[in-house]
Amino acid sequence: MNDKLLSERLKMVASFVPEASSVADIGSDHAYLPCYLMNQRRISHAIAGEVNEGPFQSAVNQVKRSGFTGTISVRKGNGLEVLEPREVDVITIAGMGGQLIRNILLEGIEKLEGVSRLILQPNVAAHLLRERLADLGWELVDERILEEDKKIYEVLVFDRGDGNKPYQDLSERERAKALLFGPMLTLERNQAFVKKWSHELDKRERILRSMENSDATSEKEVQVKDEIQLIKEVIS
C-alpha cells in the first residue's frame, strides 16, 4: 500500500496505536488504516470491520493487494459484532458522528473485554464520547484537533482507568467546559480549535437570533445562550 493514500487524520489515529498491539478498525472502509499500520510494522495483526457490502469488498481487495491477507482479517458485520472478547488490544473508530460511535461501543460493550485502548475520531459531537466513556471507566489520556481539506477533526484516546481523572477538582461549570471542548484541547487552543469554535459560535448566534423572534423563552434557548457564553469564555 502507498502510505500517501492515508489521510492526515488517520495518520494521527495511527500514531496512538501502541507498538506490537492488535487492532480492530471498525468502519474500516478501504482498510487503509490497518494496511498502513502493518506497513509500518506497528501491529501484530488486525481486524477490519465493515457493515456495507461495497466498502467490505474494497477492504478485501485492498488487503489482498497489500499482501496482508494472513495478518488482516476483513469481516462483514455491524459495529463490534465482528469481534470476540479479548481478540484485540486496541479499537479504532474513525469518520462517524460521536453519537453513532458511542452507540456502537455501548451496543457491543461485552466485546470491550481485553481492550486496553480506544482511539476515536468523531466527525461531530465529541463531547458525547467524553461524557459517556468517563462514566464507564475509560480515561481520556490524549486528544488532538487538526484541519485537513478545510474540515476540522478531533482524535480522542481513551485507556482503561479513572474516567473522572481529567475533570477532577473542577467546578461544575469548568467540568462542563472540559467535556464540551476537551480538557487538553482547551489548554492548547491551537489554530484549528479556535477556528472550529469560532464557527460554532457563529452558528449558535444565528440559531439564537431565530429563536428570539418567538415571544416564549424555551429551554433550548437557555441552553444555546449558555453555550454561547461558554464558547466566548474559551476562545477569548
Image (cartoon, rainbow, N blue to C red):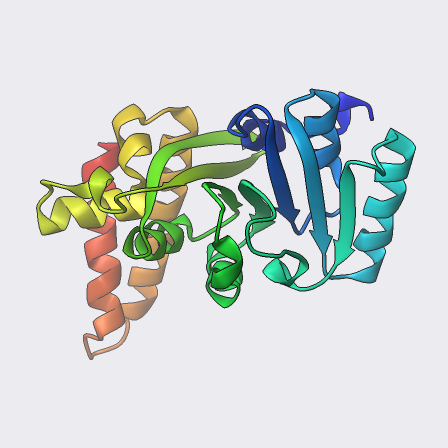
Snapshot quadrant of residue 149: top right
Please tell me which residue lies in front, 95 or 19.
19
Q: Position of residue 128 (x, y in %)?
A: 37, 56
Front residue of this view, candidates 59 and 95: 59
Residue 30 can be seen, yes or no: no
| Left or right of 35 on screen, residue 153 | left
Horizontal side, residue 41 vs residue 127: left or right: right
**Image location of residue 71, percent across then percent down:** 77, 36
- Label count reads 0
Q: Residue furthest bottom?
A: 216
Q: Is residue 211 visible?
A: yes
Q: In the image, what residue occupies the spot 65% across and 28% down?
A: 43
Q: Residue 9 falls in which quadrant of the image?
A: top right
The quadrant of the image that shows the N terminus is top right
Q: Position of residue 189 (x, y in %)?
A: 32, 27
Q: Is residue 7 left or right of residue 200?
A: right
Q: Is residue 49 above or below residue 147?
A: below
Residue 183 or 196: which is nearer the viewer?
A: 183
- In this rendering, the answer to whether 208 lies above or below 16 is below
Q: Which quadrant would residue 212 be assigned to in this image? A: bottom left
Tell me the residue at 43%/39% (across/down). 156
- Residue drawn at x 88%, y 30% as measured from the top left: 67
- Residue 170: x and y in percent read 11, 42
Q: Would you say 154 lies left or right of 150 here?
A: left
Residue occupying image coordinates x 26% and y 76%:
214
